[in-house]
Amino acid sequence: MKTLFALCGLLFLLAGCNSASSGTTAPQSFSATSGKGLAIGTITFEGDTPANDIYRFFYGPTSGDKKFIRRNAGKIMMKAGRENGRNFTGDFNNSKTYLFVIEAEPGSYAFTQYNHLDHIGPMGSLTSSRKFAIPFEIKKGEIAYIGELNYKDKAEAGTPKIFVSGAFERDMAEFRKKFPGIDWSATQDKTVKSGDKGNGMVEFL
């Protein structure tokens, strides 16, 4: 679904609830006594250059009251558009793989949609995906690795855009390097194996 509107770039950047940008952050400390839990993973882009300026992947609780859902819903956002052109700015793999850390209250969650903006500025074209569900659990005081979301920027019509798989050892090495203040040794491999494919938009490997 595409939408054209003036001031799209400004609204796009300001809209939404909690977010983790391409400059991924994590709590300074985390332990089994923490009141919240962590869900971590990676998003990898195929291709050598981005096709759009901004990408957002939305997640949130799948149950709970409105206040709980609003408090814990969020998005992972990557900004690829720069003055000197489009470039990936990820954490490794030739800057095409981004780490993400979701800190939230215990509950059942899912990635449910993505959208992208083709360029920042007036009359930018915003494209939103169909709804899908890549489900995961967040438990108090626990760290769950939920896998790699491999995003095909230029997938052919009718073929999957997101492939979900696990690269636990590879990704954990990168988390240890970027966030040495957290003890990652207790991280559990909870790579998502099934969910709502969104009529063929998502594939679980």
Image (tube, rainbow, N blue to C red):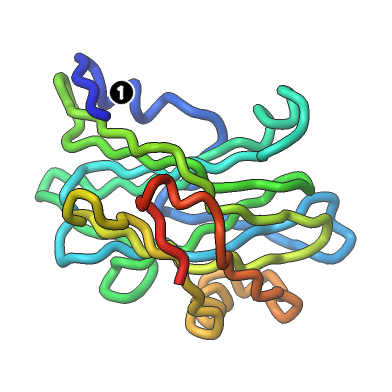
Q: Nearer the viewer, residue 138 or 77?
A: 138
- Residue at the farthest right position: 33
Q: Nearer the viewer, residue 193 or 20?
A: 193
Q: Does 72 sit above or below residue 14?
A: below
Q: At label 1, which amino acid type do we have?
A: Leu
CA neighbours of label 1 inside 10 A, class few (<14), some (14 to 19), many (20+) = few
Q: Does 17 sit above or below residue 49?
A: above
Toward which corner of the image does residue 139 lie, by quadrant? bottom right
Residue 64 image position (x, y, % from top left): 76, 32
- The quadrant the N terminus occupies is top left
Q: Secondary structure at mark 1?
A: helix
- Residue at 67% x, 37% y is 72
- Residue at 56% x, 62% y is 194
Q: Which residue does the numbered mark 1 point to in the structure image?
A: 10
Residue 137 image position (x, y, % from top left): 71, 55
- The quadrant the C terminus occupies is bottom left
Residue 83 image position (x, y, % from top left): 13, 44
- Residue at the farthest left position: 84
Does the image show residue 203? yes
Residue 187 image position (x, y, % from top left): 70, 74
Does the image show residue 98? no
- Residue at 32% x, 34% y is 128
Q: Does 94 sit above or below residue 115?
A: below
Toward which corner of the image does residue 62 lie, by quadrant? top right
